[in-house]
Amino acid sequence: MPATQLSRITLRGTPREIGLAHGENLKPQILRQLHIYKSMFEYTSRLSWSQVLKVAAEFQSTIQKLTPEIHTEMMGIAEGAGVQALEIVALNCRSEIALGKFSDGCTSLSWRKHDHARVLAQNWDWTASVGENLAMVSIEQSGKPTIYMVTEAGIVGKIGFNSAAVGTCLNAIRARPMDPSKLPIHVALRLCLESPSVADAVKTLQDLGGVASAQHILIADSTSALGLELSPVGNKYLPENPSGLIGHTNHFLENRYVDEPPWLSDSPIRLWRLNELTGELIASGVHGDDIVPALLRRKVFSDTFNAPQAIACQEDESRHEIIRSSTLFNIVMDLDRGNPRAEISLGRPGSDDEGPIMTMPW
């Protein structure tokens, strides 16, 4: 992905107005996303686009029933972009429809600075072709915190934080089963980003019946953090360790409710390396206000141990081009209740392709 600035769009109003503006502002990116995922579903899952849309129709019924406002927003995105409604639903359910066969590997970290501040950070690794379709989006809705997130065009919830200092990161998990009567993970992320606290987010997901596929959401606010190892057949919640850390990659640590065959051999290695690097920082005296974005990018998220499948992920040329992952961006969120903010860098931290630092809010 070339080093460049991400599109920045501000969405506000009713769910339909938010969706329309999303679709209209990001129409070229949405069209490219649809082209990419059509090819990806065909290659990874042997699903034609008509078969994908058939599964999406099952999810549409669920989304409309459980989260009608988000469904209305998706319909607005489709109208604004001039595409079929089910195509936008398919983008938002892409993790579920692929049954874990998309190999987007990521490394995420939550670190307690003080009793009233956390840092939440992630390298997001995915196929390079998606990079030009990412956008920084803010969403202003009546009666809800303002959302600031980095998302794929057409997708309603992703990685970011809100004005109440609640933030989310995502680690893909490959496991069965999948249940289209439950919430797709990107809708679950949106609900977390609409929540005033970690506790409220967890309660909302539980009250709505849980999620459709096995995934990990690392969620934090200024006073707490949890690793949500979610699945349609049961959840496990990971607390902060005694050092105030939660680290996660692309395999479950405690959730044994699902059928999870080994898939990314580097996932345990990245987690071990993440724990080693943060342990070294703690041993060197790093704590509190020392935990800043530049330090994490330089000392943790730029790490190339076990390259190319490292924390700073490089393309593995042994894989088919359409599913070759590399780190597309790093985000470090400072979840201070009085002033939540984030820094985003494009490309692999510490490499020649690392782009400029951007901030949210902007």
Image: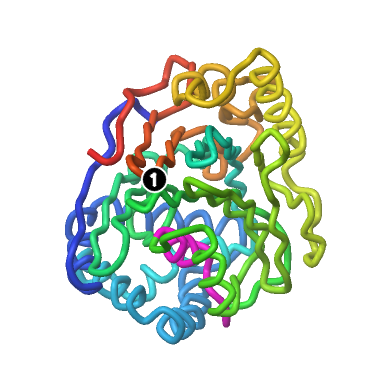
Give the residue type that dot 1 points to. Answer: Arg
Q: Which residue is mark 1?
A: 337
Start-end of magenta stretch? 181-193
Q: Where residue 306 sits in the image (x, y, percent)?
A: 71, 23
| Image position of 346 (left or right of 222) | left
Screen quadrant of the N terminus: top left
**Colouring scheme, one of rainbow, by chain, secondary structure, one colour:** rainbow
Q: Nearer the viewer, residue 109 or 51?
A: 109
Indicate whether 257 appears above or below 245: below
Mark 1 Cα-neighbour bin, 10 Å: few <14, some 14–19, many ≥20: some
Q: Nearer the viewer, residue 57 or 255?
A: 255
Indicate whether 70 appears above or below 118: below
Q: Quadrant of residue 329?
A: top left
Residue plotted at (56% across, 38% down): 324
Residue 152 in sight in this render: no
- Judge whether residue 333 is colored magenta: no
Indicate whether 286 appears above or below 43: above
Q: Nearer the viewer, residue 165 or 310?
A: 165
- Judge whether residue 188 is colored magenta: yes
Residue plotted at (24% across, 52% down): 28
Residue plotted at (43% across, 28% down): 347
Indicate whether 100 appears above or below 204: above
Q: Where residue 3 sits in the image (x, y, percent)?
A: 33, 25
Residue at the front extreme?
A: 115
Screen quadrant of the C terminus: top left
Residue 353 in sight in this render: yes
Residue plotted at (23% across, 56% down): 27
| Image position of 140 (left or right of 97) | left
Q: Where residue 351 sits in the image (x, y, percent)?
A: 48, 16
**Dominant SS in magenta:** helix
Q: Quadrant of residue 108?
A: top right
Instruction: Label 1, secondary structure: give it.
Output: loop
